[in-house]
Amino acid sequence: MRVLYLLLLALGLFSQLATGVNLLTGFGQRSDHYICVKKGGTCNFSSCPLFQRIEGTCYGRKAKCCIR
């Protein structure tokens, strides 16, 4: 009987963790913001500053990645 309760508890914990998986970008995948900063860029919602070009997107394609 104790084993049954432990299994149900474990199942309940894993079901709670599964709802948070959607918040992550996935295993082995980086967010677009991370990739932009790693390349040396900055994320801007407005247009890129002078002498910088658009090199991608940030925040789920809502902002631009600007690189010098």
Image (cartoon, rainbow, N blue to C red):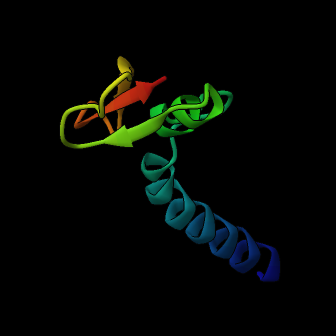
Give the x, y percent position of residue 41: 51, 32
Q: Is residue 53 left or right of residue 6?
A: left
Q: Quadrant of residue 54?
A: top left
For the residue pair 59 and 49, the one nearer the viewer reads as 49
Residue 65 location, quadrant: top left
Q: Residue furthest left?
A: 46
Name the residue rendered at 64%, 32% in the picture. 38
Q: Residue at x 51, y 50 (%)?
A: 21
Q: Residue furthest right?
A: 3
Q: Quadrant of residue 3?
A: bottom right
The percent position of residue 44, horizontal first and vertical second, equals 30, 42
| Above or below, 14 relative to 13 | above
Position in image of residue 56 (x %, y %): 38, 19
Residue at image point 44% right, 58% down: 19
Instruction: Please determine whether, in this image, residue 9 is positioned above or below residue 57.
Output: below
From the image, which quarter does the N terminus lie in? bottom right
Q: Give the total number of marks visible in the rendering.
A: 0
Left or right for 8, reference 59: right
Q: Nearer the viewer, residue 44 or 28?
A: 44
Q: Is residue 39 left or right of residue 25?
A: right
Between residue 31 and residue 22, name the one nearer to us: 31
Q: Residue at x 31, y 35 (%)?
A: 60
Note whether 49 is above or below 16 in the view shown: above
In x, y percent, where is residue 53? 36, 17
